[in-house]
């Protein structure tokens, strides 16, 4: 049998008789020893990374784990017009199926069990049909102007300490989508949107707050020491401008006046994006009626006023058909408000 075809005799002596094999075996032995001893090396030779603390109150995984009774949408009414507005807001919230409570702050002298009284009738409707919790209060009237002065009353939301979080919304608004998700945002004493139409100022049209006796005391002190032309917006900015969580104004705070303007970068947050009124309205959750000097939607404007102040149609640079979408959207917002007001509040309002 020739050497090339003879079977090789694999024996331990043959395997370890090679110098190369002994070197490989030695290296494998060293690697095994190091891997076994490494876990027992002194800890001072390794960087120390402390364990993160376990959250005491981890965020809920889904809505079923949320105690919605800890949260509330808040409205305040200091005259019949704003009472009707608030009931309109609550009607919308019920239709949207929001999960948080709803509370209404109103003057304690108003009757709440007299169906013959228009105000009382709306209070009864809010309580019995819409599930609103009625809370009679003393109006915070700190101005000669009854409308603006009574706006301080919204800040009584800071005193509703039986709730963990309250979302206060001005009633001269239309709500298009639920805002329940705001209650689950990270904890903050106050959360506000920017007043995007102003420079370096926050809006008080929507306030997400955590009620507390301490914060309410600060509010009261600030109202007591306010300047003659200070109202709720100034008070909120003075106290929380540099100490609050900022909510995106898009989609939580859109002015009707935006449809009348030519420049929209402040709202859009971009010089490049084109303002598409139909797209904007679909994504918006809250529209606030603000078109000074055009009157609020529950006040009848003359045809001449409307034609003078409504958004103008635009013609593209290339010519062709006019684009009247801003005008149509703006007019629809006002007509929709008027129609809903009549359906919700009746002819007395």
Image (cartoon, helix red, strand yellow):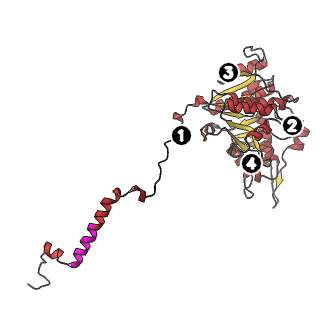
Provide the secondary structure element on which disc 2 rests. loop
Identify the mark at residue 229; answer none if there is no mark: 2
Identify the mark at residue 277; answer none if there is no mark: 4
Residue 18, x across and y down, in percent: 19, 78
Residue 164, x across and y down, in percent: 62, 32
Farthest residue, direction bottom? 2
Residue 289, x across and y down, in percent: 79, 38
| Quarter of the figure with the N terminus | bottom left
Provide the secondary structure element on which disc 1 rests. loop
Residue in front for this viewpoint, 170 or 243: 243
| Quarter of the figure with the C terminus | top right
The residues bearing labels 4 and 1 have C-alpha atoms spaced at a distance of 36 Å
> Is mark 2 in CB contact (under 8 Å) with mark 3?
no
Q: Which residues are magenta?
A: 19-29
Identify the mark at residue 127; answer none if there is no mark: 3
Q: At 13% from the left edge and 78% from the top edge, which residue is drawn?
A: 8
Q: Which residue is mark 1?
A: 59
The residues bearing labels 4 and 2 have C-alpha atoms spaced at a distance of 34 Å
First reached walking from the N terminus: tag 2 or tag 1:
1
The residues bearing labels 2 and 3 have C-alpha atoms spaced at a distance of 36 Å
Provide the secondary structure element on which disc 4 rests. helix
């Amino acid at each position: 049998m020739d050497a090339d075809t003879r079977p090789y005799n694999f024996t331990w002596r043959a395997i370890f008789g090679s110098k190369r094999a002994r070197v490989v075996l030695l290296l494998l032995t060293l690697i095994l020893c190091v891997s076994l001893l490494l876990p027992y090396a002194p800890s001072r030779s390794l960087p120390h990374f402390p364990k993160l603390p376990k959250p005491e109150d981890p965020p809920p995984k889904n809505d079923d784990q949320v105690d919605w009774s800890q949260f509330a949408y808040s409205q305040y009414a200091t005259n019949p017009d704003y009472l009707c507005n608030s009931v309109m807001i609550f009607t919308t919230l019920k239709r949207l199926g929001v999960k948080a409570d709803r509370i209404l702050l109103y003057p304690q002298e108003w009757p709440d069990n007299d169906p013959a009284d228009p105000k009382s009738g709306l209070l009864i409707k809010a309580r019995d049909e819409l599930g609103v919790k009625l809370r009679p209060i003393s109006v915070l009237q700190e101005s000669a102007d009854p409308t603006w002065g009574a706006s301080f009353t919204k800040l009584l939301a800071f005193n509703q300490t039986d709730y963990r979080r309250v979302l206060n919304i001005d009633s001269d608004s239309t709500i298009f989508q639920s805002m329940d998700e705001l209650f689950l945002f990270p904890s903050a004493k106050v959360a506000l949107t920017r007043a995007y139409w102003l420079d370096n100022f926050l809006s008080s049209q929507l306030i997400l707050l955590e009620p507390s006796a301490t914060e309410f005391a600060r509010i009261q002190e600030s109202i007591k020491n306010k300047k003659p032309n200070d109202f709720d917006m100034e008070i909120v900015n003075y106290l929380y401008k540099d100490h609050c969580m900022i909510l995106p104004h898009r989609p939580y705070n859109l002015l009707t006046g935006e449809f009348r303007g030519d420049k929209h970068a402040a709202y859009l947050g971009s010089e490049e994006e084109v303002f598409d009124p139909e797209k904007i309205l679909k994504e918006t959750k809250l529209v606030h009626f603000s078109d000074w000097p055009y009157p609020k939607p529950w006040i009848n404007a003359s045809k001449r006023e409307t034609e003078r102040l409504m958004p103008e149609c635009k013609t593209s640079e290339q010519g062709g058909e006019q684009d009247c979408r801003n005008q149509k959207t703006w007019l629809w917002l006002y007509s929709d408000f008027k129609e809903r007001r009549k359906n919700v509040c009746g002819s007395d309002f």
